[in-house]
Image (cartoon, grey):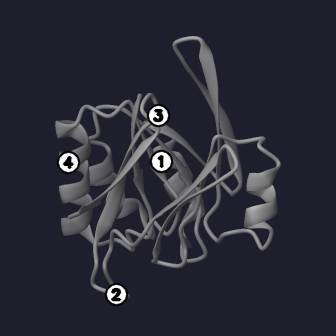
Amino acid sequence: MLIGIISDTHENMDAIEKAVEFFNSKKVDLVIHAGDIISPITFAHFSKLNCKIYLVFGNNDGEKKMLKEKYSQIGLIQEPPLEFELNEDTKTIKFIVFHAPPQNLEQLALLNKYNYIIYGHTHKKDYRKIGNTTIINPGEAGGWLFNNKSIVLLDTKEDKVEFVDI
């Protein structure tokens, strides 16, 4: 299964458009957004995805009622953490998505309850394995803090994480 991961878009419409085009070109099965979407205007681009999108609210998402109204049409959006499972072949893949990383991130990974822990907020790329858990922060898609616009392509079948500059 191919999953697109994005975070901290901060209403950068050009970056969102590039990310959506990339995810569609790769035929991803799902996109996960780890927060800081900012406003419903972003829906115009994300609605062009050829798959569902799961989003969590970030600390800068102020128009939550309208964001929920819009994004519920093409996926789901909620306060973090978002826990969900996907079935691939004969195995179940467990995810948890945060905006800000929990203080006990490493301990959470060591529980081996989740295959993937995804977070945003820091605007810094993070990819590491702790036990059987993969931790991913795709970095900042908006590029406002470090001017390094990045997203992630996750292949769950191969357990491969690829950072992509947009």
What percent of the width, then of the height, locates residue 48? 25, 41
Query: Where the C terminus falls, by quadrant?
Result: bottom left
Q: Which mark is residue 146?
A: 2
**Mark 1 Cα within 10 Å, few/some/many (few <14, many 20+)?**
many
* Amino acid of disc 3: Thr
Specify which label sits upstream in the sequence, 3 or 2. Answer: 2
Q: Which residue is mark 4?
A: 22
* Amino acid of disc 4: Phe
- Pick the front one: 149 or 109: 109
Mark 3 and mark 4 residues within 8 Å of each other at the beta carbon: no
Specify which label sits upstream in the sequence, 1 or 3. Answer: 1
SS of the residue under disc 2: loop
Query: Nearer the observer, disc 1 or disc 2?
Result: 2
Residue 4 image-quadrant placement? top left
Q: Which mark is residue 156?
A: 3
What percent of the width, then of the height, locates residue 146? 34, 87
**Mark 3 Cα within 10 Å, few/some/many (few <14, many 20+)?**
some
- Pick the front one: 130 or 10: 130
Q: Which residue is mark 1?
A: 32
Residue 11 image-quadrant placement? bottom left
Cα–Cα gap, marks 3 and 4: 18 Å
Query: Nearer the observer, disc 3 or disc 4?
Result: 3
In the image, is residue 53 above or below residue 122? above
Residue sitting at x 79%, y 53%: 110
In the image, is residue 25 above or below residue 130? above
* Amino acid of disc 2: Phe
